[in-house]
Amino acid sequence: MNLPAPTSLDELIADGALVQADVDATWSATQGTVTGVEFTGDTVRLHSRAGVRDLPAREVARIVDGEWTWSEDHDLDVPELHDPQPAGEELLRAARTLHGNVPVLLAPYPDGARAVAVDVHTAPGPVRSALTLGLAQLSPLLDARRALLSFAAARGLGVRTTEDSFGFSDGTTVTFEGDRPVDVSGGLSLREVRADALHLSGEHQLLLHGLHPDPDIRLDIPAGRARIDGHEARALVIATVTDGTWTWAWADPHLPPSPAANLRRFGLDHGIIDLVRPRLPLDPGLIDVAKPVLDVWTHAVVPLTPETDAVVLLDAPHLTLPGPEDPRTRRAVEMVLGAGVPEGVDKRRAREAYAQRRGVTLPADPG
């Protein structure tokens, strides 16, 4: 499948997005955070905590009074490449695509700044991790399938596509739900993790609501603690929700570092893109996905401000489920199974995982 030449700025940005995310991961690991940039002629001097480094570079654009003017002509039929434009992040990304996806940095100048392409070429990372990271960073406004096709061309891979998947000749497959990529093959999928957690999560919530029908939860986020109607508990904020947008705790600048960062690591390890996306539309099913990763099974939603809620995992002795032989367990299991499964969740897998984790024999499935 051939990649047609881009005819819009969005297509040009999509063409470089996945390779650039891979380049940036390696660049960040080796270069660190760049704190200063100087450009003279054909050399850029980078300042960072690691010291000073000189690298070959070329000017690609000039920015004066907030206006971006390209320093060279381009043949592509993309209007933004031929006339001065308001400077912005989109033009920086487009410039990277035009120059082999290398880093493009802004160097201060007396009249404004110069956008310079740094002539540094990093070794490509493993296909699955590169795709997971890149797709997690890809704007939903960009064409993910075009981005994948461009990535395949850059890696020299063949492709095969269906309505709900995009496969590469190395055996890697990206699964789609509509236009949205959700999983990169090679590990557990989002749906599998959710199915495995669904019923055990449900039983823990049943216990919480039985003990605390209308809980008063006081959070101490820095200490990782909470009080639930006076009971002490370990508390782990996994996400915040504002105006229908879910932000993972590891991506929320207002929250301290915590074990919730393991969710992102798990997502990278297994190719689960939603665990690596910093922000996404609210999906309560993500709570069930987080629980087995962090091995904390009770959750609550706690207001932080009038606009923002925290999704919190809670762990305390009194929230521990009774043993499989306890008389209360059979009734709880029946209630949990009676709640059914959400659309898209594998019912059989959910039952098998629940029976194994809970150590019980489940009643026959009525169908």
Image (spheres, helix red, strand yellow):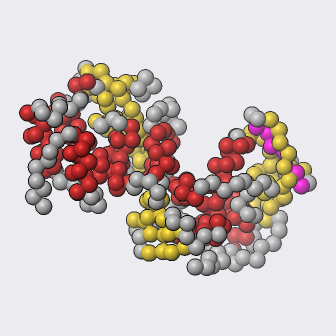
Q: Quadrant of the N terminus?
A: bottom right
Query: Which picture quadrant has residue 29?
Result: top right
On screen, residue 65 versus residue 290, left or right, reads right
- Measured as percent of width and height from the top left, residue 228 is found at 27, 25
Query: Which picture quadrant has residue 259?
Result: top left
Highlighted magenta segment, given as a residue range: 42-48
- Measured as percent of width and height from the top left, residue 198 is found at 26, 48
Does the magenta run of residues contain 326?
no
- Measured as percent of width and height from the top left, residue 234 is found at 35, 26
For the point 41% across and 26% down, the residue is 224
Please name whichever residue, 286 or 112, is drawn nearer the observer in this view of the structure.
286
For the point 85% across and 45% down, the residue is 54
Task: From this view, report whether residue 54 is shown above or below residue 6.
Answer: above
Task: From this view, report whether residue 231 is shown above or below residue 110.
Answer: above
On screen, residue 78 versus residue 190, left or right, reads right
On screen, residue 210 versus residue 250, left or right, reads left
Query: Which picture quadrant has residue 316?
Result: top left
Please name whichever residue, 185 or 291, is drawn nearer the observer in this view of the structure.
185
Does the magenta run of residues contain 46?
yes
Task: From this view, report whether residue 175 is shown above or below residue 351.
Answer: below
Q: Is residue 140 visible?
A: yes
On screen, residue 121 versus residue 210, left or right, reads right
